[in-house]
Amino acid sequence: MDIYEQIAVKIIQSQEGIIGPVAIERAQVVDGMTLDWANHAVSITGDKVRAVEDLIDQYKELFGEISVQVSKDAVKALMLQLPSDKIPHHLK
C-alpha cells in the first residue's frame, strides 16, 4: 500500500472505532477507493489526494468537524512522510 492508502486505512479504522460498521459503508462509496476490509486493505485509483479528502467528507457529513479532527489525529505520524503540497486539505 502506498502512503495515501495507508492514510485511508488509518482513518477508516479510527472512524470504525467510533461509529462502527457505518465507517466501512461510507468508505465504500468513495470514488476510486476499493476496500478489502477483512484484510484492512484499501486500494485507490486515480487522484489519491482527492480520494482521501472525499473519505473524510463522508465522515464529516455525519458528524461534522469532530470527524475531521479524529482523522487528523489518526494519521498525524503519516503526514510527516508527505510534502506539504501533497497533504489533503482536511489534514493540514
Image (cartoon, rainbow, N blue to C red):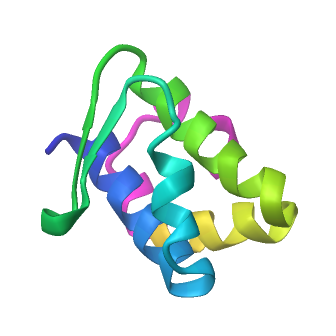
Percent x, y of residue 12: 45, 63
Residue farthest along the bottom direction in this orientation:
17
**Rendered residue at 49%/73% (across/down):** 21
The correct choice, above or below, for 58 with respect to 34 in the image is: below
**Rendered residue at 42%/35% (across/down):** 83
Query: Which residues are drawn in magenta?
Result: 76-92
Percent x, y of residue 24: 45, 60
Q: Is residue 9 part of the magenta span, yes or no?
A: no
**Res. 5 image quadrant:** top left
Q: Is residue 7 left or right of residue 20?
A: left
Q: Is residue 40 left or right of residue 91?
A: left
Q: Is residue 25 left or right of residue 68?
A: left
The correct choice, above or below, for 43 with respect to 17 in the image is: above
Percent x, y of residue 7: 38, 53
Q: Quadrant of the N terminus?
A: top left
Between 1 and 26, the one nearer to me in the picture: 26
**Rendered residue at 12%/65% (across/down):** 39
Percent x, y of residue 17: 50, 85
